[in-house]
Amino acid sequence: MTDLTEIESGLPEIETPPAGTEEYFGTAFPAAQRYAEHLATTGIEWGLIGPREVDRLWTRHILNCAVVAEFVRENDVVGDVGSGAGLPGIPIALMRPEAKIVLIEPMERRVEWLSMVIDDLGLENVRIVRARVEELVDEEMFTVVTARAVKAMTTLIEWTREVISPGGRILALKGASVEGELAKAKKLIKRYRLSQPMIHVVDGGGILEVPSRVVEIVKK
């Protein structure tokens, strides 16, 4: 396991998890705390997140992504496109240990960081693929693809449509501009015979003051 002892002594003041967070993660909460420590230390040192994010790690990042797991089933194979700092893939893996999570990331430095964190957290349901998702056609197939802050919906659909199994789903974390993105993607959705998008507004059972928006699109 990675030893964080040297940097833990100078650990920045991480945002206190909102009330209910421990219950929400259940037995995975200690690992979620460890992940938060990685983001606040090695994540900043390696350039995965900015130092200003430390005081909102739980609400803006970890919990914001963990809610995607509410739409993930036990037997799903989830591809996290452009995983970066493991968001949303790692929170999903913590919440859904029975599902298989694939972190898809093309940048070597980020892949090295992800490998270090996955080993330290002991996440046996996670593997990392160094590639762009569009390079994985004929190599990987997912029942779910997810992404956070990775391109517009039109691009995400084009990149992922051939690696989603029939009946599989896109679960994309989106911001306030999601309606506009979906309007632009309307023709693509029809062309590729995808379902009409559903926008789920989720707050983790009241934990998040600012709910997350998860766009769900099913491949027919």
Image: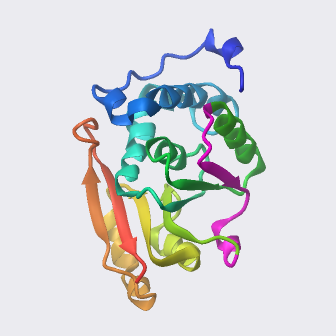
Question: In the image, is residue 5 above or below residue 156?
Answer: above
Nearer to me, 26 or 216: 26
Magenta region, residue range: 121-138
- The picture places residue 23, in percent across and down from the top left corner, at 32, 30
Q: Quadrant of the N terminus?
A: top right
Q: Quadrant for residue 198, please give it.
A: bottom left
Quadrant of residue 169 in the image?
Answer: bottom left
| Left or right of 181 in this view: 144 | right
How far across and down, in percent of the image, does residue 191 sit? 43, 90
Question: In percent of the image, x 73 and y 52: which residue is there?
Answer: 107
Residue pictured at 27% horizontal, 35% vertical: 207
Residue 187, position in %: x, y?
A: 39, 87
Residue appearing at x 62%, y 25% in the figure: 41
Relative to 19, is 160 above or below? below
Q: Residue at x 23, y 41 (%)?
A: 205
Q: Looking at this view, is 138 or 46 the one in front?
A: 138
Q: Is residue 215 magenta?
A: no
